[in-house]
Amino acid sequence: MWIPQLSLAIVFACAAHGQSTKIAKIEEIFRLTNLEQMQKKMLEQVSASMPAQLSAMGVPVEAQADVSEMAAEMTKFLFGRMSWEAMKPLYLKAYDETFTEDEISGMLLFYESPAGKAVNEKTPALMAKVIALSHTRMADLMPAMQTRAKELADKQKEKKQ
């Protein structure tokens, strides 16, 4: 009678061990890809952009102190809710549900390789270049987009008349 129960316990223990091994591998990917540092930089960028966003909203000078205080409170709130400690379990769950253990193992091999290290090291510079190119492209497209928007608005006015 106890043999089936023991077998079931062994199956559950193996499954739990396999899961903890997969989670450990995912955590190693986080370490190799500097995910915690990238997440922190993202929060810092959002925080740094808040004053510019608020000034773009056309806040009157007399209200800017209140708005700055509000921005500081919102930043504190954001950092608390989006900190690495708060987000890590969500990242773990997403990776665990998205990738098989074999895929995670392959990712580890890649990120431990010279090519993986180069990708990890050079991705921030690559993204900065892509963002700069995108801004340039958007600036080039803006006159044509404005012309097209005006044409569409004029067309809508004609339909209403």
Image: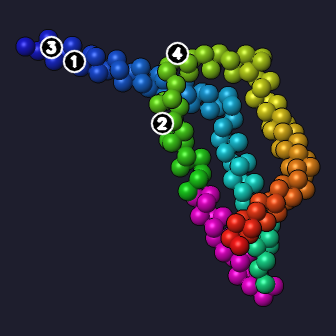
With 68 as the anchor, is 23 left or right in this view? Answer: left
**Residue range (magenta):** 61-80
In this view, which residue lies farthest toward the top? 3
With 22 as the anchor, is 49 left or right in this view? Answer: right
Q: Which mark is residue 4?
A: 3
Quadrant location of residue 18? top left
Residue drawn at (67%, 45%), measured in percent from left and top?
A: 39
Give the distance between the C-alpha atoms of the residues marked 1 and 4, in whole angstroms: 25 Å
In this rendering, does residue 51 appear at all? no
Q: Are marks 4 and 3 in contact (CB under 8 Å)?
A: no
Q: What residue did someone put label 2 on?
A: 93
Q: What residue did someone put label 4 on?
A: 102
Amino acid tagged 4: Asp
Sort mark 1 into few (<14), some (14-19) or many (20+) by Cα contacts within 10 Å. Answer: few
Residue drawn at (80%, 24%), measured in percent from left and top?
A: 118
Sort mark 2 into few (<14), some (14-19) or many (20+) by Cα contacts within 10 Å. Answer: few
Give the distance between the C-alpha atoms of the residues marked 3 and 2, in whole angstroms: 31 Å
Which label lies toward us, 3 or 2? 2
